[in-house]
Image (cartoon, rainbow, N blue to C red):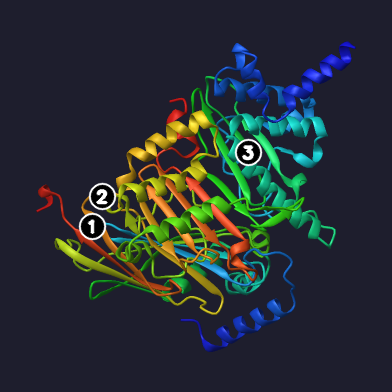
Amino acid sequence: MSGGFERWQTFAWLFLLVAGTSLVFAHRLDECLEATLIEIKPDEVRVQINMNPGVQVADAVIWQIDRDHDGKITRVEGDRYAKMLVKQLALALDEERLKLEFLDATFDLVPELKDGTGNIQVNMRASPRHPSMRAGDHVVSFENHHQPQLSVYLLNAVLPKTPAIRILKQERSENQSTGRIHFSFKPAAHDN
Amino acid sequence: MQKHLLLAILFILARPGFNVLAEEAGQSATDSPAGKIEAAAKHFLTTLDAAQREKAQFAFNDAAQRKRWSNLPVSMVSRAGVRMGDLNQGQRDAVWAVLAAALSRVGYEKVRQIVGADERLHKAERDGRAMFGMDQYFVSFLGQPSATEPWMIQFGGHHLALNITLAGKNGTLAPSHTAAQPAIYEIEGKTTRPLGRENDKAFTLINALSEAQRKEAIIGAQMRDLVLGPGRDGQTIQPEGIKGAELNDKQREMLLDLASEWIGIQNEAMAATKMAEVKKDMEQTWFAWSGPTQNGSAAYFRIQGPTVLIEYAPQRLGGEPTKHIHTIYRDPTNEYGLKWWPK
């Protein structure tokens, strides 16, 4: 989790930016869209977050990434930010808390992010301790606690690529920062 | 006299709907929808000088250009092609004639109304920046206009991205983005709602469901944006809401009719083929809703079937969300007409 001081600084950025800018036109300005896709596979769970910071909050987001403030996001800076983001997520399969492993991240150029048109994508995966999931009904739970003061959220299950996984129901909190995906797992006959 | 005659012919060819005149005249070269679109596109190219033609044309396999579309203004996300503001009136008319041939009458009207809404934003611009308005739309072709071979027309700018892939008698709009702000405005005393029919049909459908069906259809969370909007090519999500199999015949008809507001943007012949395909899958097509069910409210909805995905999302971005709408149309099995590409 980010420290209290970092959170305070993010608040300060947001206040200054929003207070200092008039609404010229109505596109996403003062919020960051965090759209999460969760793909459930028989042996792992993949998580992808696409972030689109609005123009008025882009500096606050970039400030967390471009730590030397040179206007460029290096691989090291990007990975550091993505790993910090991963720590602010929680994923569980049934009662088991899963450890999310950072896979890769892509960042559009800083000018694009500043314009409110840039995208940040972070890919992660997690595997349960016992790789062979039992047949039957299960639940994947997800929580996103990354920059709640800036963000709006979308949370969706990816259409499973295997017939062994069938999504039964998706439940989300009102703002979609947290949710539960109910699914059934029926291994192919030769897997039994 | 001959010059006037030539001009008159060019005017007829360039005006929207010339294909109808051509059809009435029984001109064999433009008898098929694909032939009419090809003829209109080739005519447009003849109105351009060499530099403009170079800007307008891309290779069919130019992946970067194919994906160069957005909901955002062109000043924020640059487009390529020929800018409408750089064309003279005859050339602009020729662009509109291409769209008139490629789109249905209602689709063409919708596109004009979306551009008209953006023109309203342009008139309200005070700081001299040219972000909005009719001049800020771009047209381009990928591949050569043809009645038989695959090629593509792109027309778009702020709140509009038409990606029309054509291959002989086949055609698709997937993926395309329609949107409107303001979503309701007056022009010459007449109220215009570019996405009004979509909105009204959706509210009629959600209110035609029984209480139990509505409970299934409604997603219990705010939908703040399109899930598979611009930039989300290739992603697929789990369908939600109520499945077509749980609707009665009348409700399924209403759902299909709602989907026709997007599918029917394309010219009638090509849209009919797609409508038949979607109709066949209606029992596997889902309808999801988020928000109040009283017409006039801001509500999100999604139609998702084996070969179609449609989202309608009011934008909660400071203004009145019912006056700023984004939508997306996709076909997960045939984005950019992939199944018709040369192998």
Q: CA distance from mark 1 to mark 3?
A: 47 Å
Question: On what subunit does the disc labeled 1 rest?
Answer: A
Q: For the residues carrying marks 2 and 3, which lies nearer the camera in this image?
A: 3
Q: Who comes first in sequence, dot 1 or dot 2?
A: 1
Q: Which residue is mark 1?
A: A42
Callout 3, which amino acid? Tyr
Question: On what subunit does the disc labeled 3 rest?
Answer: B
Q: Are marks 1 and 3 in contact (CB under 8 Å)?
A: no
- Examine the rendered structure and indicate whether residue A53 appears above or below residue B25: below
Callout 1, which amino acid? Pro
Badge 1 and badge 3 both on one subunit: no
Q: Which residue is mark 2?
A: A162
Of residues B313 and A188, the one drawn nearer to the viewer in this rendering: B313
Q: Secondary structure at mark 2?
A: loop
Q: Which residue is mark 3?
A: B108
Q: Secondary structure at mark 3?
A: helix
